[in-house]
Image (spheres, rainbow, N blue to C red):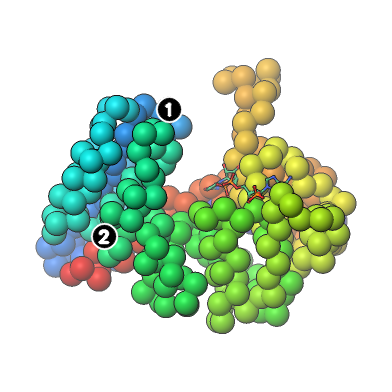
Amino acid sequence: MSARILDGAAIAAEIQLEVRERTAKLVARGIVPNLTVLLVGEDPASQIYVRSKNRACHEAGMASATITLPADTPEAELLARIDRLNADASVHGILCQMPLPSHIDADKVLRRIDPAKDVDGFHPMNVGKLVLGDPTAFLPATPAGIQEILRRSDISTRGARAVVVGRSTIVGRPMANLLLQPGPGGDATVTVCHSRTRDLPAICREADLLVVAIGRAHFLGADAVQPGATVIDVGINRIADPTAKKGYRVVGDVDFDAVREIAGAITPVPGGVGRMTIAMVLQNTLLAAERQA
Ligand code: NDP
């Protein structure tokens, strides 16, 4: 039987509508939530992503600005820009688009952003709050978006055996922590796998919920999936496709066609997790504005 497709695009649209309604209430009080993005250099993927964030902000009734700096901007200048944004009461959320040029220490930059404006949730203060289960944490967009997909699709994680493949600080680790927290969207028994894990397929086959975030096209096949499991594919990989207009297409880390035949539910790529990321950044910006108000 073919798996239920978890429609991230529809859920993201639902969240963006909710954000718009809450934003209108703040605007009526004279507060316009403002997201300011720092973009250093001319990475084409980053430029597209930043444009999408700006568009989504405007659709939600928020203000957004992009500060574009040349690739050779000294680290000190970027840090000074962040200091000014931290001090600017009209700016509620600050993002520094990654990757940064190699002469800039990304950790230093992430630590410089005021945790109250850190809508990416990457500042150690927010990471610590997430681990401690403090509800005032800004949650990183991708894992928080996955949790929303599960909640809004009525997929219970309580007591479930969850396996997260990938231990990055932006996806795998925060995902594992969220699934572990007590309460809705949590209460799972979590295993985290990575490139040194022995017999990955056997561990994955034990999962009721499998979250895959490794960055390898079609890596995980049906042999690694328990029948009926929920499979969340975070991967965004370009593969050559001469029949596509651009010469490539985007696929996930999971072999979708094979796995959908065995899984109970699955997120597609594109149209799954990726669509949630911007919605969650908007939600965090709104939250930041509500708190600062
Ligand atoms: P990273 O490269 O930071 O981390 C990849 C992780 O996968 C590492 O922990 C690595 O293990 C693990 N890994 C790599 N190869 C294997 C393997 N063969 N077996 C088991 N584990 C392996 O990636 P990210 O977490 O940043 O991103 C992962 C994917 O998700 C990418 O395709 C990225 O584009 C996508 N992504 C999508 C987002 C969205 O909005 N949908 C947002 C963020 C990322 P080790 O630590 O041992 O090296």
Q: Hey, which quadrant is residue 229 in on the image?
A: bottom right
**Nearer to us: label 1 or label 2:** 2
Look at label 1 and name its amino acid. Answer: Pro
The spot of residue 145 in percent (x, y) is 51, 59
Residue 87 disc label: none
Q: Which mark is residue 114?
A: 2
Q: Secondary structure at mark 2?
A: loop
Residue at 24%, 64% (x, y): give it: 289
Q: Is residue 151 above or below residue 259?
A: below
Above or below: residue 248 compared with residue 255: above
Front residue (pair 24, 202):
202
Residue at screen point 60% across, 71% down: 179
Q: Are marks 1 and 2 in contact (CB under 8 Å)?
A: no
The amino acid sitting under disc 2 is Asp
Q: Is residue 152 visible?
A: no
Q: Position of residue 244 (x, y in %)?
A: 63, 22
Foreground residue among 164 and 274 = 164
Residue 176 lies, in percent from the top left, at 60, 66
Q: Left of 190 or right of it: where is 175?
A: left
Q: Nearer the viewer, residue 293 or 19?
A: 293
Sequence-first disc among 1 and 2: 1
Q: Secondary structure at mark 1?
A: helix
Which quadrant holds residue 240?
top right
Alpha-carbon distance for marks 1 and 2?
27 Å
Q: Quadrant of residue 30?
A: bottom left
Q: In the rendering, which numbered label is found on residue 44?
A: 1
Nearer-the-camera pick, 62 or 202: 202
The residue that appears at 71% across and 63% down in the rendered structure is 163
Judge the density around disc 1: few (<14), some (14-19), many (≥20) Cα neighbours within 10 Å: few
- Is residue 286 found left or right of 254 in the rendered image? left
